[in-house]
Amino acid sequence: MIFTRKRELQTMDTQKLLGEVAGQLLSGAIRVVDLSAQLGPDTPLIKLPPELAVDTPKVEIHNISRYDKNGPWWAWNWLKLGEHSGTHFDAPQHWISGKDYPDGATDTIPAQNFIGPVNVIDCSKEAAADHDFLLTVDHIKAWEAKHGAINAGEWVVMRTDWYKRNGSEAEFLNANETGPHTPGPTAEAIQFLISKDIKGWGSETIGTDAGKAGGMEPPFPAHTLMHKANRYGLASLCNLDQLPPKGAILIAAPLKIEHGTGSPIRALALVSNG
């Protein structure tokens, strides 16, 4: 009886809390920040060496009808796009290291895992000075000393302001004859975050790894290690400069694609407007 009453009180408290959150959303006290880039034919996509892999085709939007003879009262389109196009979610099954997780596809991941507190590590000045900047364990520890510990079940994202290049594929990929030059994490940094049991890792660049991550050990550590640990990735995020270091809630829900390895998303953050 005591435990039943306790659960009832907890339910009432939770309902009250949700009501307060709803009220703050309606009043504007909580602001919704759009963390997603526009998705269309000009969306930058990763370019892989043809001898290594096949690239994702460009996004296509095809009209079915627009208030015409093909549909007199409505407008709608059909789309052709890759799972990892634009602002997107990487599921564990995206990488060979996470291929065996039964809950590692977009249709099997628990919905609870798509939302959580987010830690925003600001590396914008470093990335502006050095396009190959790498986030290290020491950088993360220094950030924690200033802003507080990164806790289990939280997102961690790397702010670089790289999203401001998103209007040009050439600038966004920033590649030359030596390969792409974009900021990202070291393997040790990713392993350190995994040891803290985070929910996942996100970036503002085309992928979750640095441009030169192919030469790291292991190659592409944000993919290899995160997905090996059944964790998630977010890429091509925008507007991280509008989020506080701590205190925001990140919502990053992929489409429930059958056996999906990822999905374009409309990533959102809830932040205090105070």
Image (spheres, rainbow, N blue to C red):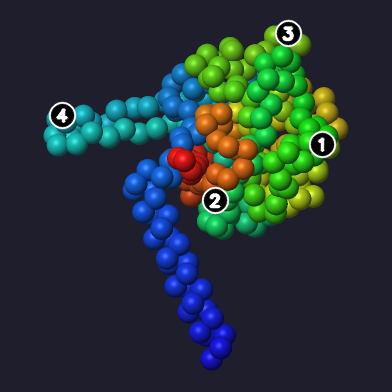
| First in sequence: mark 1 vs mark 4 | 4
Measured Cα–Cα span from mark 4 to mark 3? 49 Å
Mark nearer the viewer, 1 or 4? 1
The residue nearer to you, when weighing 241 against 261, is 241
Q: Is residue 169 above or below residue 99?
A: above
Q: Amino acid at mark 1?
A: Val
Query: Could you say where residue 211 lies in the image, as x and y percent from the top left?
Result: 72, 22
Q: Is residue 125 left or right of residue 57?
A: right
Q: Amino acid at mark 3?
A: Glu
Quadrant of the rendered image containing residue 216: top right
Q: Quadrant of the N terminus?
A: bottom right
Q: Residues within 10 Å of mark 1 (few under 14, many from 20)?
A: some
- The circle drawn on residue 137 is 1
Measured Cα–Cα span from mark 1 to mark 2? 25 Å
| First in sequence: mark 3 vs mark 1 | 1
Quadrant of the rendered image containing residue 67: top left
- The circle drawn on residue 115 is 2
